[in-house]
Amino acid sequence: MLERPNAFLVSSREYFVLFAAIVAALAILFNNDAPQLDAMRSFAVDRYAAFHVLADWKTWRDYTPEEVRALRQRTTQLLLENSQLRESYLENMRLRRMLEYRERMALDFRAARVLFKESNSTPNTVVINLGAAENVRANMAVVTPEGLAGKVIKVNRHTSHVQLLLDRDFSVSARIQRSRVLGIVTWTGAQDLELTGVARHADVTPGDVVVTSDSSALFPPGLRIGIVQEPSVEPSGMFKRIPLTPAVNFTRLEEVFVLMTPNRNLRDQLDLNSGNGG
């Protein structure tokens, strides 16, 4: 009875060898940083994105692409506007004795689909289905309706690599939205963030919202980053240790939005408005 399976294995050994060779070749391809292989990886990722678009069409065939895009964009726009309204309200409270205050520029963003997460990669990245053909550029901010998710670090023709906030090389200038205390947000491992560089006597309480500050070189102010857990004083006694719960649920990251307006353009607009106000 064993003769028939053995005969099948012998007759099919060439196919097993071919399959093993393909697997080995793919492993070498995706773990090599040579420029030629990097170009091949980019080509493969773009082809995967095209396949993913077809799969999405089958999933959403009962809706027109315009309807889906409009609903996603409207939801994110409302949530981001709500966050900015809160920021504008606090700013108005601080500047209410002044004749005028700077108007914030409207954010221009595009919806993107997370194709896959690059496992065991450094930096911690995901790949989205927007690229150079859609005017995406490196260092553009990537957000969700909940807040800041990361930034674009590499752009292919129809896909881009996004470095997530949960990465050891990612840091962002931030402030406590309520008390305006400044600090730097960094990743501490797993799913946790920390606000660093805050003096021990600073006004920080559990539940405070942490947002991007106007000191950031890449990100517009007011984007939610996380929520303060339980602050404590470091052993040195000079600074607080302020753990944060990320605003974005990175374990369920499927839809993101790329802010198409570079922050330097936002700054130029704000400076222009400030100058016109005298």
Image: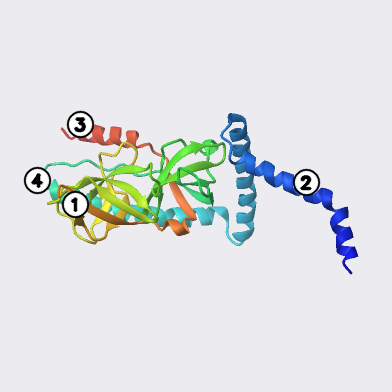
Labelled disc at residue 97: 4
Kindly report which numbered mark, 2 or 1, lies closer to the viewer in this rendering.
1
* Most distant residue in the left direction: 97
From this viewpoint, is residue 147 visible? yes
Q: What residue type is labelled 4?
A: Arg
Q: Residues within 10 Å of mark 3 (few under 14, many from 20)?
A: few
Could you tell me which residue is drawn at 62 percent across and 34 percent down?
A: 37
Labelled disc at residue 176: none
Does 113 sit left or right of 249 as displayed?
right
> Mark 3 sits on what residue?
275
Q: Distance between the residues labelled 1 and 4?
A: 42 Å
Q: Earlier in the sequence, mark 1 or mark 4?
A: 4
Where is residue 174? Give x, y as percent. 26, 46
Q: How many labels does the image show?
A: 4
Q: Residues within 10 Å of mark 1 (few under 14, many from 20)?
A: few
Where is residue 87? Give x, y as percent. 24, 51
Does 116 sit left or right of 82 as displayed?
right
Where is residue 131? Give x, y as percent. 53, 39
